[in-house]
Amino acid sequence: MLQYDWLIGAQYKPMELLKSEWAAIRKSPAWAIDSWGLGCLIYELFSCTKLSKTEELRNTASIPKSLLPDYQRLLSSTPARRLNSSKLLENGEYFQNKLLETIQFMEILNLKDSVEKDTFFRKLPNLAEQLPREIVLKKLLPLLASALEFGSAAAPALTALLKMGSWLSSEEFSVKVLPTIVKLFASNDRAIRVSLLQHIDQYGESLSSQIVDEQVYTHVATGFSDTSAFLRELTLKSMLVLAPKLSHRTISGSLLKYLSKLQVDEEPAIRTNTTILLGNIASYLNEGTRKRVLINAFTVRALRDTFSPARGAGVMALSATSSYYDMTEIATKILPNIVVLTIDPDCDVRQKAFQAVDQFLQIVKQHHDKTSTGDTSTTSMGTSSIPGNAGLLGYTYVLYFCCYFNI
């Protein structure tokens, strides 16, 4: 202290140090001078001004009321009565708040048991909204991303990560959140995999086609053959977001094989939604693949399914993809199979069948009219024949999914 005393400005020195009362200093608690210095620091922080003379410390207008008693004890004129700075953090009312408790929990996450983690992370999304946004994004978000990446955080933490990530710009999200999400797809934790798929609509658009095709899809695809029907269903649903980003090679070489198996899945809702998904991703298939896959999937399997919503989905899928079939396919493969369903036991299936028959007969009739007048241009009705077909497919998908799992 003697050697470095000159480094400290007089305004920051307690009276005993300013007067060089070394005997009194030796008898004082070890923290006495440091506590005084902490009091000076608190003054400067809250007053936003540099302390110029010791007397200014008496101006407490800017000190928070919950901190004021401890501030005054730190600056006691009697060294022995000064507050120990460690006690300030442990017992001070000002430091007992949600922000510090949250940061402290995250910093010692590895010492917490699974029940504590689960409870904490389920509350974190709502809690984060009450905390200072800048601290959440610059302190809590990196801690949370690291905890998830290295396996110390529970699956509910992903909800909190995405909630915080939604407050970032798209560029920041791609840098600070997306890499962690991509790594999580390789996790063997089923709860993590379920959470990733449940929230895919929140980050799926941010994934590049290359990342989806080369890093994400391989891990997601394992869910198609999972023993859990719920996970198979979520995997299927995720393809609405991921399929548009897959290469044709991946779709025709891998995805269609999985969907072929799911069309005969033991769960009727999965069979139904597989048909609906095929109708939605038909535009991403090339002409050869569509001819090889669609009619067989919709007529041979979907229209003959024992589950009536699956048959209805097959009819809707054919209607939605009508522009992909030539006249011979419509006349010999599609219409004969749909006409049978006009006497289906289920009223909804019959109604859809009558609509589809009208649609495809109109396509054939237009072809006949053009042929009769010598017009050889291709007749294509497309999905516009029944307004809103694409929307119906999407809506039905969600409807079956929610009903089946009682969501």
Image (spheres, rainbow, N blue to C red):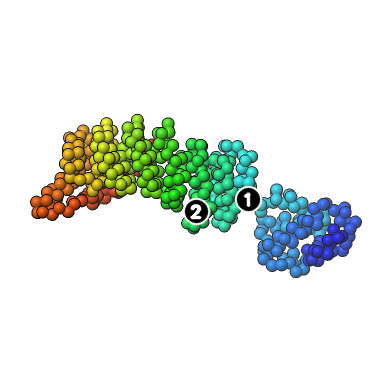
**What x and y, as percent, mark residue 158?**
51, 45
Residue drawn at x 74%, y 61% is 40
Which image quadrant for residue 343?
top left
Instruction: Give the amino acid type for the residue marked by disc 2 in the picture.
Output: Ser
Locate the C terminus by quadrant: top left
Relative height, residue 179 to residue 49 (above, below): above
In the structure shown, which secondary structural element does the residue marked by tag 1 occupy?
Answer: helix
Which image quadrant for residue 325?
top left
Q: How far separated are the C-alphas under marks 2 and 1?
A: 28 Å
Q: Is residue 222 visible?
A: yes
Residue drawn at x 22%, y 35% is 346
Residue 100 marker: 1
Relative height, residue 100 to residue 298 (above, below): below
Residue 331 marker: none
Could you say which is closer to the camera, residue 317 or residue 162?
317
Locate the N terminus by quadrant: bottom right
Could you say which is closer to the camera, residue 378 or residue 360?
378
> In the image, which is nearer the foreground, mark 2 or mark 1?
2
**What x and y, as percent, mark residue 267?**
35, 32
Q: How many marks?
A: 2
Residue drawn at x 44%, y 49% is 210
Q: Which residue is mark 2?
A: 174
In the structure shown, which secondary structural element does the residue marked by tag 2 occupy?
Answer: helix
Could you say which is closer to the camera, residue 144 or residue 42?
144
Q: Residues within 10 Å of mark 2 (few under 14, many from 20)?
A: some
Q: Residues within 10 Å of mark 1 (few under 14, many from 20)?
A: few
Q: Would you say 236 lies left or right of 91 here?
A: left
Instruction: Give the amino acid type for the residue marked by disc 1 in the picture.
Output: Leu
